[in-house]
Amino acid sequence: MTGCWRQDGQMVDNDTTEKESGVDGLMSRSMWRSLFLFLVLALVLTGCGKPYLSALDPAGPVAEKQFSLIKLSLYIMIGVLAVVMIIYVYVLIKFRQRPGQDGYPEQVEGSHTLEIIWTVIPIILLIILAIPTVVTTFSLAESYSDEEEAGDALLIKVTAHQYWWEVEYPDQGIVTAQDIYIPTGQRVYFELTSKDVIHSFWVPSLGGKTDTNPGLTNNMWLKASEPGVYHGKCAELCGPSHALMDFKVIAVEPEQFEQWVATMTEYDDKPKTALAEEGRAIFEQSCIACHATDGVTKSPYPNLAGFGDREMIAGILQHNEENLARWISNPEEVKEGNQMPSATELGLSENDIEALVEYLMQLKLQ
């Protein structure tokens, strides 16, 4: 019998040793394959996401300040990586083992000079990053609470709900939801709060995140340089439909904004067809306790004035009659955990839903 002695003093035959070695080799190769696949998957996933939800495409001064900090930190990290890689390649080449060479290269452990260098350099880099970060953070915080600066600016009060956004323009007497209209080229101040749990108000292209807390009010301002539709989201885990809690900031020229204000304050929600007239009657019977349609009444749930012109249905569905009928029929299927009752719970038939859709789609800004 041939074999070898293990470290524990037991003898094993060569066949057993070879089998164990083969198993270890297979496990090692499997581990490396899994690691490679994981790295490839991670690389692919970094390219996923919606391009309009990006802080890398600033469209206002707040977002531009924050983007400059992102670039600074990125430049520092790229510089560190480049220096480390250059040193690494240099060491690999210079101190490689050459034919006929015996022993080890000179060892440098315990070098006080090297220890000081790789301690001081990170501290310097952190200071370079920290100073503009702290200055920008404090300057934005001061400007958010500057009452003199905010005196003549447009004020918008936003209240977060599970899972929608209530929008109020107190000086104009307007109440709406989901779509936030603002004029371009002007500072717009926001007072942010929540009706239920902690949410977070975030419009990546215009500025950073600000929490909305029940019983508290946080302040911030945004400014859109160009007209456009800027997508926003809740950035704080708030329940099962957190990922579906979207909204839009619609920036228009100041003249258009004034027209929008005039339309909303004198909003006409009268039906324009016989089917819409029927839908209005059903709405007043089944929906009026929760929703208003006049643009000025603060209702328990979204004010639907201008609903026919909104960007999305429930913040996430494409705005069309089919999706509206789907939402009315079974809201829980679309947005889990929302508080809107289904058509079955309201006792609505298919014909009732069709009439409601006709009426709601006619609620457009003139």
Image (tube, rainbow, N blue to C red):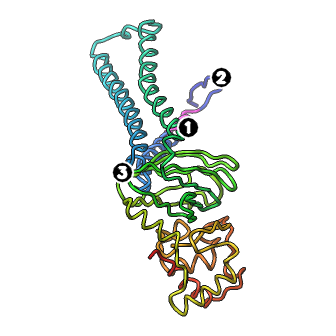
**Disc 2 marks which residue?**
9
Spatial CA distance of label 1 from label 3 is 67 Å
Q: Nearer the viewer, residue 49 or 318?
A: 318
Q: Which of disc 3 and disc 2 is earlier in sequence?
A: 2
Circle 1 Cα neighbour tier, 10 Å, few/some/many (<14 / 14–19 / ≥20): few
Circle 3 Cα neighbour tier, 10 Å, few/some/many (<14 / 14–19 / ≥20): some
Q: Position of residue 277 (x, y in %)?
A: 57, 89
For the view shown, which residue lies furthest in the bottom direction? Answer: 274
Quarter that holds the N terminus: top right
Circle 2 Cα neighbour tier, 10 Å, few/some/many (<14 / 14–19 / ≥20): few
**Residue 199: mark:** none
User: Given the image, on which type of amino acid does mark 1 rest?
Assistant: Glu
Q: Which residue is found at the position 72% from the left and 79% from the top?
A: 345
Q: Position of residue 300 (x, y in %)?
A: 68, 66
Q: Nearer the viewer, residue 5 or 270?
A: 270
Q: Which residues are magenta?
A: 13-25
Q: Which of disc 3 and disc 1 is earlier in sequence?
A: 1
Secondary structure beneath label 3: loop
**Disc 3 marks which residue?**
225
Is residue 41 visible in the rendered image? The answer is no
Is 147 left, or right, of 63 in this rendering? right
